[in-house]
Amino acid sequence: MAREKYNREKEHEIIGTYPPIRGMELGGTPDGGVSFVPETPRFYRPIPVYENFKMLFAGEKPYWIPRCGWFFCDVNEFRPRQHPDNLANHQAIDGGDFVDYKAQGNLYYGWFRTPLEWEPKSMGATVRPGNPQLTDMSRWEDFISMPDLDEIDWEEMREMNREYLATDKANQLGIQMGLWERMMNLMDVNNAALALMDEDQEEGIHRFLDQLSDVYVEYIRRVSRIGRIDSVMFHDDWGTQNGPFFSLETCRRFFVPPMKKIVRACHDLGIIFEHHCCGKAEKLVPAMVECGSDFWFPQAAINDVDQLIEDYKDAPITFAVSSPLLPAACSEAEIRELAAKWVDKYKDKGILLCQDVSLNGNPDHNPAMYPIFEDAVYEYSRIAYQD
């Protein structure tokens, strides 16, 4: 069936609004640390936004280049407060009332009864090192138990998010602390790193990660029953600023098998899997491919994204590409020209667009120009893909 031709007037018509979101705390923001996403306009689109998002991963040409990220994009981020890790990280992004994080306090217990402390500079929660719950993975069952998913109020989650998940955006379930991150939180980083090299702990690590992956699989399945979930963003940082935490061989030995299980479960449910992996992790992309991960958003400042796109052009993985620096002195016409060149460069690469917020502190960058850039990327990619 022929595609609806791009109609600039029609596709810039406001047909509704997306509700405001206030549930994610960011360090140092003027309103006391809480990020408030105001009500935003909803424009006419030739197909639902989530369908366009999923077309990319089905190997089809989308109607426009999909935009990913936390807010102001094609994704509706979902981090239900019924999961304690989300409250600990001050990220209750859902359809419920505003969470008073100040009243909650900076210390909150997440899964495994881990004491997670909010740290505003990193805008997340982690353990205070020096008192790990585990030091020996060979005996982890003597000290901790897997989370009991029956303790989650699933009916409350369903009722709270009926409207929130009814959006035409791609609903993305965010999961804090994946496999390696969970090990680091339970053991402290040094003990977790040593465990990966200790033959006496290897079998225990395999048991732990296998059972933990089962918990994640069941969590995803249960959340998918309360509303439409199109994507999962699974947080598991495999890299530091300078390189991977571990070798590709180590990654394949410990993390690929349980991660593959989680990804397979997502795909069985028709859910796209995003591996949210901070750090310089280019050398571990082969492991991401083996896991079946659908996409990764590499930090452009420390990863060669264009080279990754070229190296893995025939692999079943794609990448989110950062928006470029938008010069402070540029006019609207010049920003649109930048967008036209960006679309021409990436239109045949099967990528997503994501705003590079790391540029916001750069005096040569004007983030206020991003909506113009984003709008132009939509227009030019619509035109490029309409035939």
Image (cartoon, helix red, strand yellow):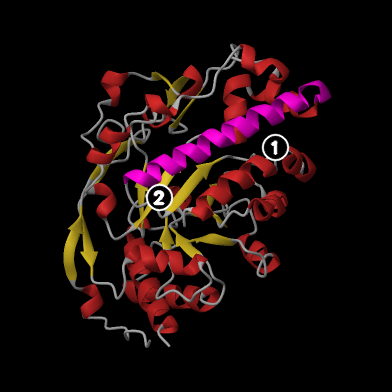
What label does residue 172 carry, if any? 2
**Which disc number belongs to residue 257?**
none
Foreground: 32 or 229? 229
Spatial CA span between label 2 and label 1: 27 Å
Count of picture labels: 2
Mark 1 neighbour class, 10 Å CA radius: few under 14, some 14 to 19, many 20 or more: many
Q: Quadrant of residue 373?
A: bottom left
State whether residue 176 is above or below residue 150.
Answer: below
Q: Are marks 2 and 1 in contact (CB under 8 Å)?
A: no
Q: Quadrant of the C terminus?
A: bottom left
Rendered-image quadrant of the N terminus = bottom left
Dot 2 or dot 1, earlier in sequence: 2
Q: Residue 42's spot in the image, x, y percent?
A: 22, 63
Q: Residue at the spot x=61%, y=45% of the render?
A: 261
Left or right: where does residue 358 sit relative to residue 208?
left
Magenta range: 198-226
Q: Nearer the viewer, residue 220 or 102?
A: 220
Q: Amino acid at mark 2?
A: Gln
Residue at 38% of width from left, 79% of height from top? 382
Residue at image coords 57%, 16%: 144
**Would residue 356 appear left or right of 257 to someone viewing this image?**
left
Q: Quadrant of residue 9?
A: bottom left
Q: Amino acid at mark 1?
A: Phe
Pick whichever, 157 or 48, lies toward us. Answer: 157
Q: Position of residue 164 (x, y in %)?
A: 25, 48
Secondary structure under the numbered disc 1 in the rendered image: loop
Q: For the residues carrying marks 2 and 1, which lies nearer the camera in this image?
A: 2
**Residue 132 visible in image:** yes
Number of the label disc, if any, that sits on residue 245: 1
